[in-house]
Structure formats: structure tokens, C-alpha cells
């Protein structure tokens, strides 16, 4: 089975707020779906955390390398693309685009063999996993109204992040966390994401240490991105001293970038994003490396329905991965998978056991949020 062509389909019109200092607008494109078409009419879907224009440019560079390649060999093909494009810059748009291709090739391999991707990644340790609702921080008086509807939907784990946190004063930070803990109650998991990869982050090690002490008082499950993403030594010191677990790694790409962080003991929880890190092939290797260093692997998932499906599959194949991120309020999550997503009575998310990633793309919704002519995909995918 050969790769015939690869299409990039940028998502826009409903892009959710990121909490960034340079805030996203609904029409901005930061997520792009990848469709790998084969000569045997199988289509594989991937997701890239990068704008459509950069993905299209990357595909033009990669095309001579993937054209006619075996669509049933995701790890080898992805490694070929990495090895032959180092001179374009490792870790940028090229790497992100390879991530989407890799995910799509795993999807194809699963469909061709009749197996869910998690089984092909090594076997399914679980059939369901707990999703944590991921949402932005607001002013303290708004947190209850943001969180209670999600709790009513069945979520029992929540991550609040970005927004005003860390950008004003620690009293406001504590008020936000206090209001959130009171809203979800003592029995739910509550995580806090500072978002220190934002532009010109003002916090330093002492701020992070002081904040970690405060978060421990509210039984916060982990403190995510408390420091700028290049502050390796400060992460190591913080992880050793903090009373709450420290999480990070969402901006790193490929296993080689994660190795020094894991060896140094910078994280309690590592969070590679399949749509940036190099796809499921790289994510699995990082998960193995993390386990060898006593670090929990919980994938970062602020992206799309295809990204969520990828996270569910790798969670099924990772012995210790008991949580996945669920970006709330995004049509790119909720509407792009046929049938959507539903929590069970225990607030758990069933892991699809159909072949491939286990989801079908809702082509009408994809057309709505891309403005693209998807007639060829419709015909090939049988919609």
C-alpha cells in the first residue's frame, strides 16, 4: 500500500482562546489536519499543532521523500522524513508536520490490519481512561460558573490554566485556585497550568517556588509549566523542592530533546504532544524513556478530535497513563468526530476499539471549519 498524496486542511472559524498574551482570534489557524491518501483508497488522519500555511510549505519539502512510500510502515517512514530534513531545522514546522503524517500512517496501519492503534503500539492496558477538562482561568468570581457545568457533564478532573494567573499578583492567583477548588469540591482532581511558555513570561524560580507552596494547600495534583521552557536547571531545583508534582514538556519535540530533561530529573510528569513531538512513534519512545526514569507520562492534548483519538490510543498502550487532556468548548474536538464523545457514568472516556484511531471524521463539519473543497476525500473515505 503506497502513499498517493497528502492533504493539509487548516481549521479556522472557531479557534478557541489560548489564554496567550497575543490572543488567538476565531479565524486564526493553529491546528491543521493531515489526510494521507493511499493507492488502495484507505485514508489516514493526523493532526498538526501548526498553521496551515506552514504545514503546506513543509509538505512541499517532504513530498519527494514520502511520495510512493509504504503507508504501512509509520515508524520507518517518519524516521526517514526526520533524518533527511535536519538541515531545515529540527523541531519546527517540518517536525510538527511529520507528527501529523506519522499519526495518519498509524491510523492507516490500524485500518489495514483491522486493529486499534493502541494494540499495534504494544497492547491495551485499559479500555477507558479519565479525561481532565482543560479550560482557561478567569477572574475568581467566574470560576464557579466555568467549572460547575463541566462537573455536571461528568468530569471529575479539571485543569485550569493561563489567563491572568502569574501575571498580576499571588493574591489573585490564590483567589482563582481557591474559587476553583471550592467549585469542584475536595474529591475531584485539580491541576494548575501557569503557561510559562507564553511570550515574555514574568515569573521566575522564586515565584514558582512560592506558588507551588500555595498550590499544595489546595491539594493540587500537579503544577504545569511553572517556568519558561528553556529553564532546565530551575525546573530541576523546583521539582526537588516543591510539595506538588511538576509537569511540563509540551513545547519540546522529538525524543532527543526530552532525554536531558528526563535524565536531569526536571519533571514528575512529562507531557509530549503527539501533534508536535513527532507523532505517536516519537511519543511512544518518550513514554518508554519516562518510565525508565520514574516519570509519569500524560500526553498534552490541546488540539483536535484526531489529537484526542491519538492520546486515547497511546493511553491504552501505556501502563501508567491514567489521564488524558480534554480541551473543553472547542468544536474542533466536539464536532469533528462522527458521534462525538461521551463520558460514562464514572466520568471516564471509553477508548475506541475500532480499527485505526477508532474514529470517523465528520466531513461536513470539517468542510465547515476549513472552507475547503473535500469532494475527493468524501469520495475516497466513502462519505
Image (cartoon, rainbow, N blue to C red):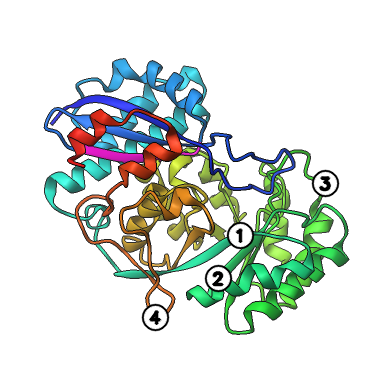
Q: Can residue 289 be seen from the camera position used here?
A: no
| Upstream in sequence: badge 1 or badge 2 | 1
Instruction: Pick whichever of labels 3 and 2 is earlier in the sequence.
Output: 2
Q: Earlier in the sequence, mark 1 or mark 4?
A: 1
Tag of residue 93: none
Q: CA distance from mark 2 to mark 4?
A: 14 Å
Foreground tag (1 vs 3): 1
N-term-proximal mark, 1 vs 3: 1
CB atoms of marks 1 and 3 within 8 Å: no
| Of callouts 2 and 4, the N-terminal one | 2
Looking at the image, the residue that sits furthest to the bottom is 186
Q: Taking 180 as reference, is 193 above or below it?
A: above
* Residue that mark 4 sits on: 345
Relative side of 53 to 191, left or right: left
Residue denoted by label 2: 150
| Residue under label 1 | 135
| Residue 46 drawn in magenta | yes
* Residue 118 shows in the view: yes
Q: Are marks 2 and 4 in contact (CB under 8 Å)?
A: no
Mark 1 element type? strand
Q: Which residues are magenta?
A: 43-49
In the image, 177 versus 256, the foreground residue is 177
Q: Position of residue 345 (x, y in %)?
A: 39, 80
Q: Is residue 97 magenta?
A: no
The numbered mark at residue 202 is 3
List x then y, in percent, for residue 47.
Answer: 40, 40
Estimate how packed mark 1 is, as few (under 14), some (14 to 19) or many (20 or more) residues with alpha carbons within 10 Å.
many
Q: State which quarter of the image contains the N terminus.
A: top left
Marks 2 and 1: in contact by CB < 8 Å? yes
The residue at the point 12 percent across, 48 percent down is 113
Amino acid at each position: 500500500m503506497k502513499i498517493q498524496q497528502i492533504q493539509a486542511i487548516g481549521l479556522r472559524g472557531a479557534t478557541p482562546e489560548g489564554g496567550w498574551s497575543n490572543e488567538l482570534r476565531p479565524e486564526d489557524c493553529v491546528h491543521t489536519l493531515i489526510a494521507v491518501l493511499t493507492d488502495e483508497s484507505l485514508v489516514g488522519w493526523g493532526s498538526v499543532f501548526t498553521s496551515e500555511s506552514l504545514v503546506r510549505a513543509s509538505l512541499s519539502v517532504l513530498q519527494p521523500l514520502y511520495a510512493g512510500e509504504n503507508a504501512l510502515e509509520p515508524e520507518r517512514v517518519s524516521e526517514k522524513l526526520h533524518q533527511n530534513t535536519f538541515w531545515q531545522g529540527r523541531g519546527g514546522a517540518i517536525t510538527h508536520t511529520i507528527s501529523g503524517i506519522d499519526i495518519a500512517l498509524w491510523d492507516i496501519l490500524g485500518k489495514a490490519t483491522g486493529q486499534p492503534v493502541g494494540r499495534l503500539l504494544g497492547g491495551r492496558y485499559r479500555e477507558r481512561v479519565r479525561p481532565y477538562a482543560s479550560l482557561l482561568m478567569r477572574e475568581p468570581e467566574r470560576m464557579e460558573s466555568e467549572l460547575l457545568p463541566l462537573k455536571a457533564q461528568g468530569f471529575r478532573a479539571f485543569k485550569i490554566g493561563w489567563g491572568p494567573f502569574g501575571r498580576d499578583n499571588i493574591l489573585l492567583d490564590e483567589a482563582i485556585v481557591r474559587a476553583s477548588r471550592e467549585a469542584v469540591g475536595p474529591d475531584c482532581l485539580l491541576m494548575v497550568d501557569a503557561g510559562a511558555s507564553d511570550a515574555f513570561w514574568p515569573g521566575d524560580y522564586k515565584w514558582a517556588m512560592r506558588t507551588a507552596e500555595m498550590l499544595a494547600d489546595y491539594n493540587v495534583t500537579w503544577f504545569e509549566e511553572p517556568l519558561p521552557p528553556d529553564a532546565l536547571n530551575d525546573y530541576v531545583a523546583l521539582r526537588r523542592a516543591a510539595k506538588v508534582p511538576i509537569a511540563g514538556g509540551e513545547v519540546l519535540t522529538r525524543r532527543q530533546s526530552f532525554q536531558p530533561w528526563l535524565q536531569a530529573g526536571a519533571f514528575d510528569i512529562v507531557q509530549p504532544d503527539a501533534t508536535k513531538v513527532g507523532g505517536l512513534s516519537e511519543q511512544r519512545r518518550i513514554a518508554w524513556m519516562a518510565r525508565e526514569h520514574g516519570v509519569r507520562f500524560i500526553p498534552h492534548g490541546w488540539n483536535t478530535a484526531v489529537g484526542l483519538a491519538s492520546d486515547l490510543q497511546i493511553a491504552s498502550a501505556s501502563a501508567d497513563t491514567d489521564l488524558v487532556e480534554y480541551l473543553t468548548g472547542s468544536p474542533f474536538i466536539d464536532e469533528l468526530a462522527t458521534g462525538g464523545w461521551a463520558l460514562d457514568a464514572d466520568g471516564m472516556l471509553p477508548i475506541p476499539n475500532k480499527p485505526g484511531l477508532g474514529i470517523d471524521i465528520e466531513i461536513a463539519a470539517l468542510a465547515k471549519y476549513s472552507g475547503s473543497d473535500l469532494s475527493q476525500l468524501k469520495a475516497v473515505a466513502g462519505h
